[in-house]
Amino acid sequence: MERMPFPVGASTGEADEGGPLGPPPAALALLDADGVLVGWSHEAEKLLGYPASQVLGRRAVDLIATVSADRDGPRGTRPDDQRLKLDGTRSSVVAVRRRSGDTVRIAVTLHPLTPASGGAASSVLMATELEGLRWWETRQAMLRGLVAQSPVTLTIYGPDTRLLWANAASIRELGGDLTALVGRSMSELFPGDVLTAQHLAPPEELVRQILETGQPIIDVQFRGRAPGDPREHVWSSSYFRLVDGRGEAVGVCEQSIDVTDHYRAQQRLALLAEAGARIGSTLDPVGTAVELAKAAVPRYADAVLVDVAAEVLEGEDLKPVTSWDLVRVADSGENPSRVGERVTYAASSPQAESLARARSTADATRAPARLYVPLRVRETPLGLVTFVRADPSEPFDEGDRAVAEELVSRTSVCIDNARRYLRERTAAVTLQRSLLPRSIPEQSAVEAASRYLPADSHLGAGGDWFDVIPLSGARVGLVVGDVAGHGVGAAAAMGRLRAMLRTLAELDLAPDELLARLNDQVGKEALDQGGDSSDGSGITGATCVYGVYDPASRRSTWALAGHLPPAVVEPHGGTVSFLRLPPGAPLGMGRLPFESAEVELTEGSLVVLFTDGLVKARGQGIEAGVDRLAAVLGEQRESSPDRLCTRIVTELSSDRAQDDAALLVVRTRVLGAREVATWELPPDPALVARARSMAAEQLARWGLDELVFTTELVVSELVTNAIRYASGPIGLRLIRDRSLICEVSDSQHTSPHARYAGSDEEGGRGLFMIAQLTEHWGTRYMPTGKTIWAEQALPAA
């Protein structure tokens, strides 16, 4: 038989003709029945280095350096067996000597050939380098893993965007067999919404775009439901183009992985982070409950109900709960009309069970699904939060429960803080209102109305106040002030400052002198406290405007201590102006002198005193608020003081900064000639009798004959004292107001005092008798002297 090369598998000479996933090249040799080589392929020559001319006709075993059993080879092969048995297919790993002298481990398979009729038996020997074979097997295992074992879904879509092929994971995800799925479009296989923030095209358009451009798209997230699975899933998908050997696009491969758990974990963390920033922004229990509902809907639940104990809303201390009788404060969608109503849970209800056991409870017996989480702080129940999901396929799992408990835990702390603050604020506001005038007494000098606007829940009560102080001679003191700070300390400081001012006002001090003395008192208090005002009770940075109006002369005197000047609205024409007054430093800020200014007011003028909290507009300066106040005053000049107060508050409160504010509006009145009688007398003792006579005649004209005797005595004593100790003209004035007022003025600044006269003294009993016969008497000072006055009650009608 002629021996010649056996062309078994033509080679192109490439090292890896099958590509990276193709099998390694196999060397083939043909043996006759005696094991003599009669055929030799080019791959065999490349593997061992022997050309066919050197091996044909030789026995195959001569090339084998050692024949050894390999761990991966068939059992039963002995290392000392140098014969190749031809009675069946056999495989082994052997070491073969190369022409270069080194040895190489190869995997060989000997396959006997069926002899032709009458022909001799022969065999085919196939050999591959062991290392290349192992690498090829590894790559095959990788391919099998991607196709059958990988949890990552691989799907190939054709140019028409319809399914061509899918691996086992994708087939399981799609819920069918490959034959039934091939040919379906992407939208049919996975209906859902794109979750990415990018504005991407629909899936079919993505495939066409990738086919045209060749640019891959990475990590596109889709949401939807897989066939046969009611729960919503999220997939992260990446796409790249597939090309054939000619470089032409044949389809797009989609690689997807179910990231539902990871996505939900991210959403939960994002929800908690957002809720942490949103919940508790207001010290209001109801507002905090609404913030919780807004944070959880719709990202976590379809509806949220929040019920709290009534004590929480009233800022009271919590009591042991004997019955689950709560108040609905938030309902994000189930039944909003019930907000504000009382809600009672039966003892056997899951809500009551959750409250009693202080743990969250999921109610799986009802549809929609509900999760009850108690509001608690320091083992004290505050209320209950109910989370509702309308979709029955999305029940609350353990992860959802942990998120709900964390949300409610944060909310509980915020609601309890709001409750505690509400209690403190209520106490502060109650204290402040108790320190403000309960009502403004009727005055002949002015018609007055007032408003006090507390600060919002963040700041609490402040130190703003107002007062209307009756003074001698039918005059009235008008004051508005502001103590810096908020809370109980500021309210207490305001109360002390108001009491000091009222006491000084009743001494009939001029406004500038009153503020100077008040400033001294504030400074002394600061020294008594040693500069420690950390509790907020010290008076620091207080401002004030104080004025005195005399209805008999229509004159008013004003002084400022770091405060905004009053506004005046003329009764005719409605001109609005702000009094030009000498500036003064805030109280307690130094010992600078205060100055006063005198302003004559037309009868019926409106005088508006206010604190800066009324005109502090959000995002604007005080000037903008003052302009708005002036506009309201110009429009409402004909309104009564009470209606004007309401209008001002309505117009300015919506835009004002959240600070407390005090407002005092007065309309001036005038005591005319029918209520006031005035005389000027020379300092002549002979005119005392004339003064008594003029006073008696005036009382007769007023119909006050019952007061003639006492009035003659008062006039006689006061005029006599003025003549005796003073110089210059003497003023006598009678005022018929809510009482009868007798005033005598002179140029002296020395104040007389009532005393007990001795039995042997001829004088010194005048003021003592006046004090006994009249209701009140006193002295007030003016730059030109003093006035001694006495009041008598009018007889009953």
Image (cartoon, rainbow, N blue to C red):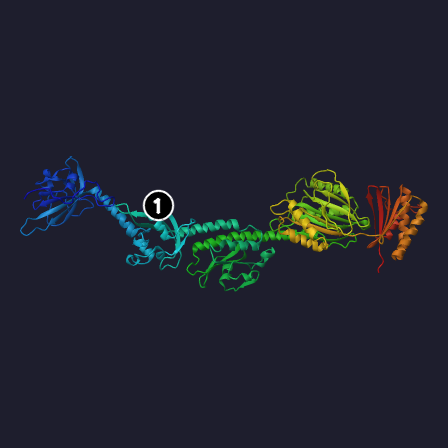
Tag count in the figure?
A: 1
Secondary structure under badge 1? loop
Q: Amino acid at mark 1?
A: Gln
Q: Nearer the viewer, residue 299 or 648?
A: 648
Q: Position of residue 127 (x, y in %)?
A: 16, 44
10 Å neighbourhood of mark 1: few (<14), some, or many (≥20)?
Answer: few
* Picture quadrant where residue 173 is located: bottom left
Q: Which residue is mark 1?
A: 215
**Name of the residue lying farthest toward the left:** 118
Residue 792 placement (x, y as % from top left): 85, 53
Q: Is residue 704 visible?
A: yes
Query: Which residue is farthest top?
Result: 100
**Quarter of the image that includes the N terminus:** top left
69 or 744, which is in the foreground?
Answer: 744
Q: Is residue 765 visible?
A: no
Left/right of residue 255 with respect to residue 726 in the rendered view: left
Considering every residue shown, the one lying at the far front of the view is 573
Q: Residue furthest right?
A: 686
Direction from residue 269 to residue 739 in the image, left or right: right
Q: Residue at x 70, y 46 (%)?
A: 481
> Is 578 in front, or is 358?
578
**Residue at the location (44% across, 57% down)?**
396
- Quadrant location of the C terminus in the rendered image: bottom right
Relative to residue 1, is residue 302 drawn left or right? Answer: right
Where residue 21 appears, as percent x and y from the top left, is: 25, 45
For residue 523, what is the image quadrant? top right
Nearest the viewer among 792 and 182 is 182
At which x and y percent is residue 474? Answer: 81, 51
